[in-house]
Amino acid sequence: MAVSNIDQFNEITGLVLAELYAKFPVPKSLIPEKFVEPATRWCDFMCADIPSEDAEFFIATVRWLESSGYLTFKDCTQYYAQDVVLTAAGLEVLKASPSSLDKGPSFGQSITNAAKEGGKETLRATVSELLGLGARVLGPAIGLS
């Protein structure tokens, strides 16, 4: 069964945020090859490998996370995102705990654990809840009410 674009988005978002949370506050460059397969495809017209649809989706996800206030980067091309780091607001959302847990692990800890253990469903569900909280926290900061 094909993965929906929302599930794919939640999975990539979880992996990216887990990576940045683990390295915070050190900026990290992100390349699609670490997050999606295949990251390239052969183009006969260009006679070269170019980003795959999954790599394009990865970069679009990183750009969306930046425009929504979760992270910032120095540069983002179709091949990489350079010097990516969580924003203060993104860090605050990751430090919050899911509503289903009373004094349990934070979103950051939960997605980091799910990313390490390969629990895609847990990762997707946790990211979905995190984005809901993020919309309430970050919405006013980016002009949404």
Image: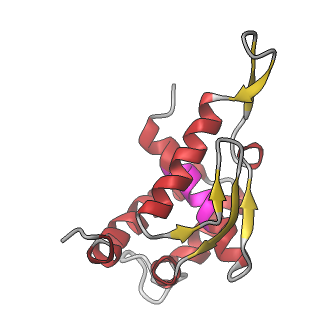
Q: Point out the residue furthest to the top here.
A: 44
Decide: is 51 above or below 43.
below
- Which of 132 and 62 lies nearest the eye of the viewer? 62
Q: Is residue 12 magenta?
A: yes
- Residue 54 screen position, x and y as percent: 61, 34
Q: Residue at x 71, y 50 (%)?
A: 80
Q: How is the image coloured?
A: secondary structure
The quarter holding residue 21 reads bottom right
Q: Name the residue furthest left.
A: 145
Where does residue 84 sit, x and y in percent of width and height?
Answer: 66, 67
Q: Residue at x 45, y 78 (%)?
A: 93
Q: Residue furthest bottom?
A: 103
Which residue: 33% across, 66% down?
132
- Give the residues in magenta: 10-17
Decide which of 78, 123 is in the foreground and name it. Answer: 78
Question: Which residue is nearer to you in this view: 73 or 134?
Answer: 73
Give above or below for 29 relative to 102. above
Q: Main secondary structure of the magenta part?
A: helix
Is residue 4 found left or right of 38 in the rendered image?
A: left
Task: Classify 27 as above or below 16.
Answer: below
Residue 19 placement: quadrant: bottom right
For residue 6, what is the image quadrant?
A: top left
Is 135 above or below relative to 4? below
Q: Is residue 39 magenta?
A: no
Q: Quadrant of the C terminus?
A: bottom left
* Residue 116 visible to an observer of this rendering: yes
Tell me which residue sits at (35%, 74%) in the image: 138
**Residue 134 locus on image (x, y percent):** 37, 71
